[in-house]
Amino acid sequence: MGLLSGKTVIVTGASRGIGRAIALYCGDEGASVAFTDLKADDFLFSLEKELLAKGVKAKGYASDASNYEQSQLLVDEVAKEFQTVDVLVNNAGITRDALLMRMSEEQWDMVINVNLKSVFNMTKAAQKYMLKQRSGSIINISSVVGVGGNAGQANYAASKAGIIGFTKSVAKELGSRNVRCNAIAPGFIVTDMTKTLSQEVIDEWFQKIPLKRGGTPEEVAKVVVFFGSDLSSYISGQVLHVCGAMQT
Ligand code: NAP
């Protein structure tokens, strides 16, 4: 019996990086896993295969989390196929970095839509099933940048700070029906998102992190398992930093 046996988990943006590790860890803990990505490509199919090989139910869906209609349809489809919606992990996210003076309206809108509106879209769709079940756990992937800000990332920081306000509000709205909502604020996690930085910049960050290294996607995934499982049954409305004591 795994920590998530009998539960259906939905993870957005799971073909790569942190989302992929979350899907795999949830599968290891016995969850049925429905996951999304923008495209139905080799990454999506290989994750589905890897999950099925663990002996759990799994299905990958091409769905844009920033699109309201697609998100409602997706969650309805998952509920039909998997019977329950127990854990929602809002992980899909992008960066479009620029200093404010050079940031375009498009860069602002894209990041807010993919990182923040997606959380509204998916949570709105999933909550109706969770309320009926009188149980559920919503886990939103924010960032330490949403707490402390970062030069060159005003759009990203605003989206991640917005997620925190949303998380705390939803925890208050849905708590009486036994639906919990928490956020995780990762620090520097080594994925494709951070691979765009030069080695020099990466080394500089590592020097500033008390644990002297970046985190791994698996180190974030373990916290998702904690929030998704009954181990955290009395925890809601919280933001847990997974950042090696990095200063925010
Ligand atoms: P990543 O490696 O770039 O992966 C992001 C995933 O999201 C990709 O699979 C991508 O799909 C998918 N995606 C993008 N837009 C989407 C959309 N509209 N609908 C559905 N899926 C979409 O990023 P990551 O580093 O794993 O980051 C995952 C989450 O953690 C993000 O929310 C990010 O902001 C957050 N985070 C990351 C770090 C870090 O240091 N890496 C730190 C703090 C927080 P494609 O493959 O199609 O592009």
Image: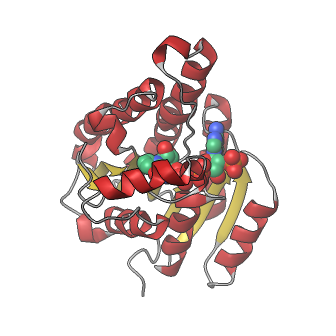
- Looking at the rendering, which quadrant does residue 243 occupy? bottom left
- Looking at the rendering, which quadrant does residue 226 occupy? bottom left
Quarter placement of the N terminus: bottom left
Residue 68 place in picture, x, y as percent: 61, 29
Using the rendered image of the protein, determine whether residue 73 is visible from the camera's viewpoint. Answer: yes
Q: Which residue is drawn at the image coordinates 34% and 53% (left, top)?
A: 134
Residue 222 place in picture, x, y as percent: 39, 70
Q: Nearer the viewer, residue 194 or 12?
A: 194
Q: How is the image coloured?
A: secondary structure
Relative horizontal placement of residue 174, taking residue 157 as reference (left or right): left
Residue 189 place in picture, x, y as percent: 45, 57
Q: Nearer the viewer, residue 246 or 62?
A: 246
Residue 245 place in picture, x, y as percent: 23, 57
Q: How many marks?
A: 0
Q: Is residue 163 above or below residue 246?
A: above
Q: Is residue 222 above or below residue 200?
A: below
- Looking at the rendering, which quadrant does residue 55 occupy? bottom right
Question: Which residue reaches farthest front?
Answer: 200
Quarter placement of the C terminus: top left
Q: Which residue is drawn at the image coordinates 61% and 32% (left, top)?
A: 66
Relative horizontal placement of residue 100, taking residue 70 as reference (left or right): left
Relative horizontal placement of residue 238, taking residue 2 as reference (left or right): left
Q: Which residue is drawn at the image coordinates 23% and 47% (left, top)?
A: 247
Q: Is residue 5 above or below residue 107?
A: below
Using the rendered image of the protein, determine whether residue 89 is visible from the camera's viewpoint. Answer: no
Question: Which residue reaches farthest right?
Answer: 41
Question: Which residue reaches farthest bottom?
Answer: 1
Q: Which residue is drawn at the image coordinates 67% and 39% (left, top)?
A: 64
